[in-house]
Amino acid sequence: MRRRYPPIGDHGLVGDLQTAALVSSDGVVDWFCAPRFDSPSLFAALLDHDRGGHFALTVDGDDVTTRQLYLADTAVLVTRFLTPGGVGEVVDFMPLDRPETATDRHRLVRIMRVTRGRVRFTLSCRPRFDYARADHRLDLRPDTAHFRGPGTEAFLQAAGPFTLQRDGTHGTDVTATVELGHDERAAVVLTVCAAGAEPPPAPTADSLRDDFDSTRAHWYRWIRRSRYRGRWQDMVHRSAITLKLLTYAPTGAPVAAATTGLPEQLGGERNWDYRYTWVRDASLSMQALLGLGFTDEAHAFRRWLGERLQAGRTVTGEPLQIMYRVDGDPHLAEETLAHLEGYRGSAPVRIGNDAAGQLQLDIYGEAVHALTSSQDLAHMAGYDGWLALSGLLDWLTRHWDRPDEGIWETRGGRQDFTYSRLMCWTAFQHGIRLARDFARPADLAGWTAARDAVLHQVMDRGWNAERGAFVQHYGSEVLDASLLLMPAVGFVTPSDPRWLSTLDAMEAELVSDSLVYRYDPAASPDGLRGSEGTFSLCSFLYVHALARSGRVDMARYAFDKMLTYANHVGLFAEEIGPTGEQLGNFPQAFTHLALIGAALALDEELNRAEP
């Protein structure tokens, strides 16, 4: 029996590097957008069980146990059904047909097989086009269902002993059952394409085998490029694959998460659309992948980011805005889908994101860091790339000293956020270093003066002597976990007395059993109702900071405990709730990039500490 709302973390992710689908451990695809991550949904039961639409391949019964896993080092997902009569499996994957070329055609392959006894599978396909706002028509043959929506069509094709039948109130959905014995197989392929496109060829046993083999081989080839040989190889490589799955290959732009509207608090209003490319998140994602040796992804994102700088198209009038669509479009008007009830009643469901119009000065530090994080990247940018970068830093010398909305995109008004100043310092520091290393023309005197002014200001106004800590914004006493990055970017040394005092204060106030809150909304109102869980990005940043500050045993303990909050296939959402549940959009790039960074730092410090 299909649950109304499975836990957010009770899903695996499959994708083809242009879009992705969530598959619950029940065998239900309850989130899928096409042709891109930020396109309207075809299946959105995760946001409304009754109206959202789903694609289920399940095994019914009173005594069915499910298990889910990835084939090692791949994005091929296996859902297993253990029943009194036998054991069945559904293998889900999306073939990677020239992923670097943007296309309107995407395939989701679902292969069933039985490994013991006999198992009866039930299929239910109920597409709901345009976030369940549009009706569709159905043309049906015994082995093919053709769903016709506005501007988009979907073909469901069966291979094996299937007979598709009409279902639903209006007869526009599809159902079927199939019973398989030991080592028998069947499959269905869902192809989503633009209206009027040529129908896909019928799947055969040979074509399905080729699709499976080529998809698995693609991921094997990709993960072999990793240089990581540390203590947590499985988790690090799963995080790397997840970051890759969340990257739109035609442009090299990573999205923050695959979903929209999943709540940071059940029943609350903190429900945002994360299917876009944040300059901050994407820059940090590429740094994490670069740390593992994935240079192609770093080059692709550098090109995308450079194009944004050169285009200068923003809704804010700034050189960069905090987020874009994956194709670089800066317009992300926010709207509410009032017809959807939201995950377990967590409304409103939003698409688009008005935070795109916010001022967040820290993005310039992350952007410059991404563009200069290796000499290879900097060298490939060439003279024109240097002119764009130096022009940005020249502009920043005149515009860094302003209140902004800060890293957490609060809607409670602008403040002089310490983290924003910290990252402006980072931008100047990396620009100065690169200009010297490559003997490039630069206003070194101006950049140095601005860098030093930022440092003096943070030390004077971002430091609260009474708290014995750096604080969230000037004039406050509020702690903020984003400042865990202070030693990581080189603003302070890990042994600096002010930093160690700040770390102690965070441990006392923001850390709960190794889990870390971003800040205290009660002490620093953010313009939103409700509360939230611990922020998994910050928990891994805490591990990183502990390791670099010489508290290696504490860091390893906190890291190992944090890994126990991963879901059954190694994925993390944005936050951890009061009872250990995953909260927020899923899976979250921020969390996985921080996991990689924490593992790299902890491995290095452990190796240094060992004889």
Image (tube, rainbow, N blue to C red):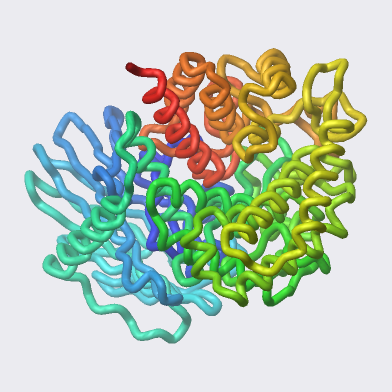
Residue drawn at 77 percent across, 31 percent down? 530
Residue drawn at 66 percent across, 64 percent down? 324
Question: Between 75 and 302, which is closer to the camera in this rendering?
Answer: 302
Q: In which quadrant will I find the C terminus?
A: top left
Q: Residue furthest right?
A: 475
Which quadrant of the structure image shows residue 503?
top right
Residue drawn at 58 percent across, 35 percent down? 537
Q: How many callouts does the rendering have?
A: 0
Q: In which quadrant will I find the N terminus?
A: top left
Residue drawn at 24 percent across, 65 percent down? 158
Residue 334 visible here: no
Residue 258 position in % (x across, y down): 52, 53
Residue 154 position in % (x across, y down): 41, 72
Question: Between 116 and 213, which is closer to the camera in this rendering?
Answer: 213
Residue 584 position in % (x across, y down): 60, 40
Residue 402 visible here: yes
Residue 481 in the image: above or below residue 249:
above
Which quadrant of the structure image shows residue 385?
bottom right
